[in-house]
Image (cartoon, rainbow, N blue to C red):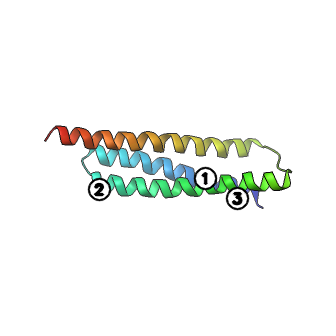
Amino acid sequence: MDVIQECMKMISYGGDAKSLALLAIKQSRDGKHEEAAATMKKAEESLLKSHQAHTNLLSYDAENQDLHVTIFMVHAADHLNAAETVFVLAKEIVLLHEEVKQCLK
């Protein structure tokens, strides 16, 4: 297994997920609720890819028990955690924007 490659997947897909989730918040704030929903779906797909890379590392380590934690691995895990936090909060913010819009009608 190429550990660096899996870490890069975690970082890049996690970063994509976070950026997309933030974009969905803006779209929702601007009243583009269908676009926001589609963007959140893309964010979720990227987040799942980041999680898959993390799972690959965990599975490899469980099987081989020879991975040594590096600062790069910690950095990758941090990106995944940040992306997940932003994604969960973005889902709630998008819903709140939709609810406010309904109340203002």
Earlier in the chain: of badge 1 and badge 3, it is 3
User: Looking at numbered disc 3 in the image, what kind of residue is underneath it?
Assistant: Gln
Badge nearest the viewer, 3 or 2: 2
Disc 1 and disc 3 in contact, CB within 8 angstroms? no
**Which residue shows up at 43% across the image and 48% down it?**
21
User: Looking at numbered disc 1 in the image, what kind of residue is underneath it?
Assistant: His
Where residue 32 appears, x then y in whole percent? Answer: 26, 51
Displayed quadrant of residue 60: bottom right
**Which residue shows up at 55% across the image and 55% down it?**
48
Distance of label 3 from label 2 (alpha carbons): 34 Å
Compared across the picture, whether 94 is left or right of 52 comes to: left
User: Looking at numbered disc 2 in the image, what kind of residue is underneath it?
Assistant: Glu
Say which residue label 1 marks: 51
Where residue 103 appears, x then y in whole percent? Answer: 18, 38
Farthest residue, direction bottom? 1
SS for tag 1? Answer: helix
> The C terminus lies in which quarter of the figure?
top left
SS for tag 3? Answer: helix
Say which residue label 3 marks: 5
Say which residue label 2 marks: 34
Disc 3 and disc 2 in contact, CB within 8 angstroms? no
Distance of label 2 from label 1 (alpha carbons): 26 Å
Farthest residue, direction left? 105
> The N terminus lies in which quarter of the figure?
bottom right
| Mark 2 nearby-residue class (10 Å; few <14, some 14–19, many ≥20) | few
Earlier in the chain: of badge 3 and badge 2, it is 3
Distance of label 1 from label 3 (alpha carbons): 14 Å
